[in-house]
Image (cartoon, rainbow, N blue to C red):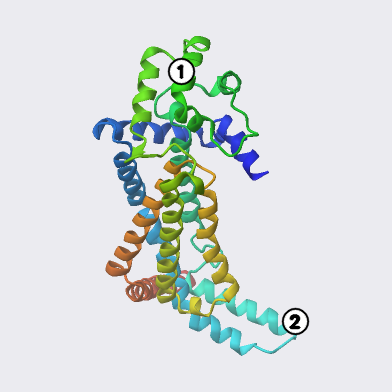
Amino acid sequence: MFDTLINMAAVNNGMAIFKPLYWFFGKCMEGLLIVFDYKYFLALIVFTVATRLVLFPLNMKQQKTMAKTTRMQPKIQKIQKKYAGSNDPRDRQKMNEEMQELYAREGHNPMNMGCGPMMFQMVFLMGIIGIIYYPIEYILGVKIADNSQAIAEAIGFTTKGGASYFQIELLQNFANYKATLMEQFPTLFTEEKVQAIEAYKSHMYIGSLDMTQTPHWKDGLIVIIPILCLVTSLASTVLSTMIQKKTNPAAAQQSSQMLIMMLMMPFFSFYIAFKVSAAVGFYWIISNLVAMVQQLVMAKFFPPKRNVAREMIENTIQRRAREESIKKANK
């Protein structure tokens, strides 16, 4: 079922809601390719770093939210300890009331735990994946979306044959499809567009590795891509967990089940790396490496203890301002 869904999405050139984002990122990638003389992977590295830099302020906001939560933990635990062991509904209600008073006094919304930055990062990820999965449409400008099914039938592409992506399939075997495509779709696959696709395909290699191929254990060295995906993803997860524990000491008490779930994600990405083109896996590797550098920079120049101290100062200033406003309103 998973493989079928992947192929259906591929033939349809992605989710409609993200197509404007695909177009925008495609134009950005096209510009980088021109700047870097069509060296695809150099352009992809620069693109990945640039998007991470754009997301940096959001990551800082997320860390600040965590710092606020950390600062409040002793007060929250004090209230919880006060009513610990009581099964009286009235005590439970009193505890909730005291917690709400604490949140109001501290100016903290427990429902706002930094999910916004994470969602924004997911949107960015979808845009980046779009230009990797659908380069013919969004980078090379061959408008095949409305004719995808007809083109798939013409070249004999079927969603029953595994998890190959449609446009990646075109790139992988373009030499075999070129004559058919130029004959049956002359307005789409003009001489100029065909040359552009062939030039793009020629830059989709790292050494002898064809990065349009889907990795398989039997295909030799290409399996290094999923393996590096796993290694870098594990490293990024472990590093993030270590930094989080410094930011939020309560995280050190997290259950083994939560830790296992966190560690499962790298193995899931390892599995997916065998279902998509090696170019996608390459992006994940670069993204993981950049994320680790970003985490180290944030830990070095914006350490958790400094964030907590800054949050305490800002909260004191804000609380005094609120108290002054209340005093003036009561006069």
Of the two numbered discs 2 and 1 on the same chain, state the one appearing first in sequence.
2
Q: Residue at x 45, y 63 (%)?
A: 234
Give the crowd class for mark 1: few <14, some 14-19, many >=20 residues within 10 Å. some
Residue at the extreme right: 88
Left or right placement of residue 150 versus residue 120 in this view? right
Residue 236 lies in quadrant: bottom left
* Quadrant containing the N terminus in the rendered view: top right
| Amino acid found under the numbered disc labelled 2 | Pro
Q: Residue at x 63, y 32 (%)?
A: 159
Residue 287 in the image, given as x and y percentages of width and height: 39, 52
Residue for badge 2: 89
| Up-down relation of residue 146 to residue 313 (above or below) | above
* Nearest to the observer: residue 133 or residue 63: 133
Q: Residue at x 48, y 61 (%)?
A: 114
* Nearest to the observer: residue 137 or residue 117: 137
Residue 42 lies in quadrant: top left
* Nearest to the observer: residue 175 or residue 283: 175
Residue for badge 1: 178
Give the crowd class for mark 2: few <14, some 14-19, many >=20 residues within 10 Å. few
Left or right placement of residue 122 versus residue 246 in this view? right
